[in-house]
Image (tube, coloured by chain):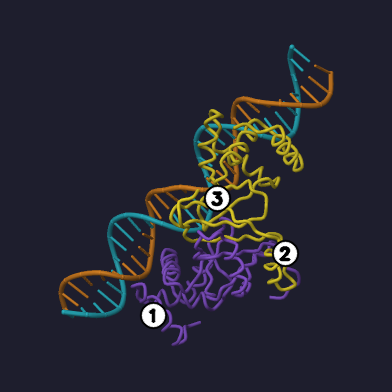
Chain colours: A yellow, B purple, C orange, D cyan
Amino acid sequence: MALSAHQREHLKESLHRVGLKPTRQREHVFSVLLTKRDHPTVEEVWQRSRTGFDGISLATVYNCLESFVRCGIVRQVNYEREPTRYCPNLAPHAHFKDAATGRVYDIDLPEPVLETLRRLLPREFEPEAIEISFHGKKARASR
Amino acid sequence: MALSAHQREHLKESLHRVGLKPTRQREHVFSVLLTKRDHPTVEEVWQRSRTGFDGISLATVYNCLESFVRCGIVRQVNYEREPTRYCPNLAPHAHFKDAATGRVYDIDLPEPVLETLRRLLPREFEPEAIEISFHGKKARASR
DNA sequence: TTGCAATTTAGACTCATTCTAATTCCTAGG
DNA sequence: CCTAGGAATTAGAATGAGTCTAAATTGCAA
């Protein structure tokens, strides 16, 4: 699925802010991320990118994803030391990993909860990021 | 530093619960973890273990740590995809990683806060574990 | 003692990720 | 339209944490 004019503009500006340029590859990989937001690994992004962008290399997919993280439009998600996953959801959220399927779900994080967490820290700690991940079972078969 | 009789007994029972035996190596590695609770990596545990246990192998340190995790007396701590760290603190706690030094600090997690987090989940999610990690700067030079 | 199962060990292996060096692509200036 | 130069892309090599394998050792129970 191609990017909308709005999405393309957003990508362009975000990249520019850190001195990078939009390219065909970056646009395509970004569209892959937006199209199926299921926290894919690099390998999965690569597979998906190759249909629609013949011959795109794995190294390029690594580079593209890294540039998105650098300019702040994509987050990395790690569970233990499994392959890193990529998430274009910019709102503050936690992740829940279903042990049975391995699927990762976004869990909305209201600001007051974040504030509660920050208040746990002694004064000398100045947090820049908070990562919250749940691990467990998910009932039912809803998507 | 050697294990106290109490600690040795605790280790023995914990291992037995999952069908493992206490060994010289396991006791030594466990004492290393208890002596300096600074979330060491495997490599660091290995270095520390070799003074006091000549010739203990890296593979054994990996095995020992894995057996501790299996029987629930040690937790793994991961930041991004850096080498896994090991933590003998059993109380529910979060971690704060200081960007400047790389040091990891334990942050106490009161039960009510955990409950708040669990309540963020839709009914079909059944969490078994919650991981919380802060990342940021720490002021002052206190330990 | 002996036998046996668990543990330890060295070293080979895996695999996600990073690096390298060569090629290709844009684009601004002529 | 050309061309030069910097950025981006690429294939493949390198890295490094962690896992696996198969052989040696250990500790214990009969």
Tag 2 and tag 1, C-beta contact below 8 Å: no
Splitting the image into 4 quarters, where does residue A130 fall?
bottom right
Q: CA distance from mark 2 to mark 1?
A: 40 Å
Q: Quadrant of residue A114?
A: bottom right
Q: In the picture, which quadrant includes the C terminus of chain B?
A: bottom right
Which mark, residue B137? Answer: 2
- State which mark lies toward you, 2 or 3: 3
Q: To which residue does mark 1 refer?
A: B13
Asked if badge 1 and badge 3 are on a common chain, one would say no
Report the chain holding disc 1. Answer: B
| Chain identity of mark 2 | B
The answer to whether the residues at label 1 and label 3 have Cβ atoms under 8 Å apart is no
Which amino acid, by three-letter code, is at mark 1? Glu
Chain bearing tag 3 is A
* D8 up-or-down from D30: above or below: above
Name the amino acid type tagged 2.
Lys
Label 2 neighbour load within 10 Å: few <14, some 14-19, many 20+: some
The structure residue drawn at horizontal position 47% and vertical position 74%, both measured from the top left corner, is: B73
Q: Amino acid at mark 3?
A: Thr
- Real-space CA distance between mark 2 and mark 3, rounded to the nearest whole angstrom: 24 Å
In the image, taking residue A85 as reference, residue A17 lies left or right, namely: right
Q: Identify whether B79 is placed above or below B52.
A: above
Residue assigned mark 3: A84
Q: CA distance from mark 1 to mark 3?
A: 36 Å
* Residue A17 point in image, percent of width and height: 77, 42
Relative image position of residue B110 (x, y in whole percent): 61, 75
- SS at mark 1? helix
Q: Mark 3 Cα within 10 Å, few/some/many (few <14, many 20+)?
A: some
Front one among B14 and A38: A38
Which one is earlier in the sequence, the residue at label 2 or at label 1?
1
Which one is nearer the viewer's eye here, A91 or B64? A91
